[in-house]
Amino acid sequence: MLAGDRIAHPVKPGAPGFDDLLSLSLAEGHDMLRKLVDEWASATNRFDSTGECYLGASVDGVLLAVGGLNRDNYDGGTGLARLRHFYVHPDFRREGLGYGLLNILIFSARLHFPAIRLRTGNPVAASFYEAQGFDRTDEPFATHRLKL
């Protein structure tokens, strides 16, 4: 169980601790944070449209998890959210940090969107999302959906 002050806050690539999460994610074979860095640098996605956000979760000032909400570009204009670039430091999984960050993002999404979609090919991540109420879907470009 994690001790210390837990804080969720806006974050962007280059923030203190982000590069450590990037390195860890790449070492695990995940490229979502590298994609985030590239999109941010090219200004194609900075999570700055209405309802969008990219947050980090820190414990005692150390960034240990990140994740964000975008408008879903694959939804055909129906106004859904998409959970993107969600990653938790491997040493701090199953400690409630990812759960807490995801719930803050869900709460935020309820203010702007009717549902959240995501895509994952990772069975462990799929189980995590399903435990938080996401349903599997066969929709194009999504594996899971949460009605808000």
Image: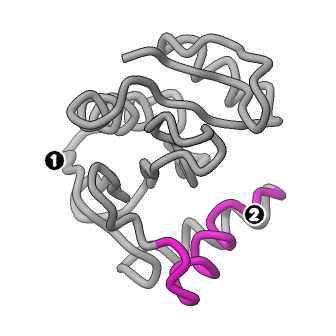
Pinpoint residue 104: horizontal percent, then vertical percent.
27, 35
As drawn, 72 above or below 41: above
Residue name at image x 27 percent, y 28 percent: 110
**Which contiguous range is marked in magenta?**
29-45
What residue sits 27% from the left and 55% below the top?
A: 50
**The quadrant where residue 140 appears:** top right
Q: How many marks?
A: 2
The label number, if any, that marks residue 5 in the structure image: 1
> Which kind of residue does numbered mark 1 sit on?
Asp
Tell which residue pokes out farthest to the bottom in this image.
41
- At 50% from the left and 18% from the top, the residue drawn is 146
Q: Position of residue 59 (x, y in %)?
A: 27, 52
Q: Classify residue 4 by image quadrant.
A: top left
Q: Is residue 32 magenta?
A: yes
Residue 97 vs residue 119, the one in the foreground: 119
Residue bearing mark 2: 31
Residue 89 horizontal side relative to residue 147, left or right: right
Q: Which of 85/62 is in front?
A: 85
